[in-house]
Every structure is written in structure tokens, then in C-alpha cells.
Image (cartoon, helix red, strand yellow):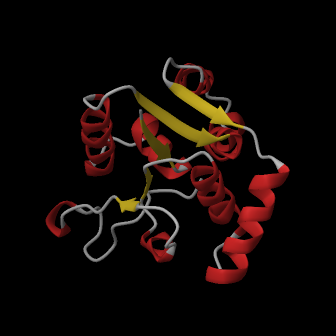
Amino acid sequence: MSRLYLDACTIIYLLEASSVFQDLVIARLLEHRAKPDPLLLTSRLSRLECRVVPLRNQDEGLLTAYEAFFSADRMIVIDVSATIIERATELRARYGFKSPDALHLATAIEHKADAFLTSDGNLERCGEITVEVLVAPEEEAPFPGITGPAREP
């Protein structure tokens, strides 16, 4: 079984971005799908992060797309448990990550993800899991020198 954890930013890229970042996420998901018994993991926190802007903008089409994504076959949305909170607290203390990042990483670690997909290079410092950072080729980045998300979740 292969488990790939998706940080909220990667889900936003997949469903909202029409850029090189969307292409990078699609390519990684296709690669993952070719593995035996592939599963996608994310935290219930991702539902919050991904749906704020569409709710604010009353974008029913995008909200429907998110609902379909989060309920898709082979997608596991993990509730934040006491164990995850404790692990996130340890990660935040050790690495100084923001609470949402620590929660995502803790969720992935506790649920034995093989890799954590994100666009946040800062999270590579986490030694407890393999962190894969999406990086656009410099010539295709929206702004030279900036390879991060188009919007924060």
C-alpha cells in the first residue's frame, strides 16, 4: 500500500490553479496512482483551509468540486485526534512550524504516509517523514524567484 499525504496547498493547486503548479500536482498524482494500492491522505484541516475562499465567494461550483475530491475513492480524510495534537505539539516545539503545518505533518506521520506533498520548502526540515516540495522551474514560475503558492489556504 502506498500512502501520499496532500498538504492543503496541493489540493488548492489541483482544483483552482491553472498553472505549472497544477501540472506538477497532476504529474505526482499520476505517478502515485501507478503504485500498488495507492491511497491519498489529508487532514480534516484541509477541508477548512481549502473551502474558506470558495465559501466567502459563494462559489458553489468550486465547493462541489472540493466535496467530490474529499469524498473520492482512495482519498482518506483524517480527523484530528489527541494523538495527532500531541505529535503536532512536539513538531512545533522541535522545528518551530506554524500550528497548521505541524498538524498536517503529524497527521501524515501518525498515519504512516510514505511521503508528504507540499509547496512549502520550510517543511523539509521535518526529519520524521519524506517531504516532497513542488518547485516550478524558474522560467515557468509566476514571478522569478517565487515558487510558492498563488494563495495561502
Residue 114 vs 3, above or below: the answer is: below
- When asked about the image quadrant of residue 15, the answer is top left
Q: Position of residue 13 (x, y in %)?
A: 42, 45
Which residue does the image show at 34% across and 72% down from the upper left? Answer: 146
From the viewer's side, name the closer residue of 101 and 1: 1
Q: Position of residue 107 (x, y in %)?
A: 64, 51
Residue 145 vs 106, above or below: the answer is: below
Q: Position of residue 66 (x, y in %)?
A: 57, 28
Q: Position of residue 9 (x, y in %)?
A: 50, 51
Which residue does the image show at 48% across and 41% down from the upper left? Answer: 11
Q: Quadrant of the N terminus?
A: top left
From the viewer's side, name the closer residue of 29 and 135: 29
- When asked about the image quadrant of residue 88, the answer is bottom right
Which residue does the image show at 50% across and 17% down from the upper left? Answer: 73
The residue at the far left in this view is 139
Residue 110 vs 79, above or below: the answer is: below
Residue 106 vs 27, above or below: the answer is: below
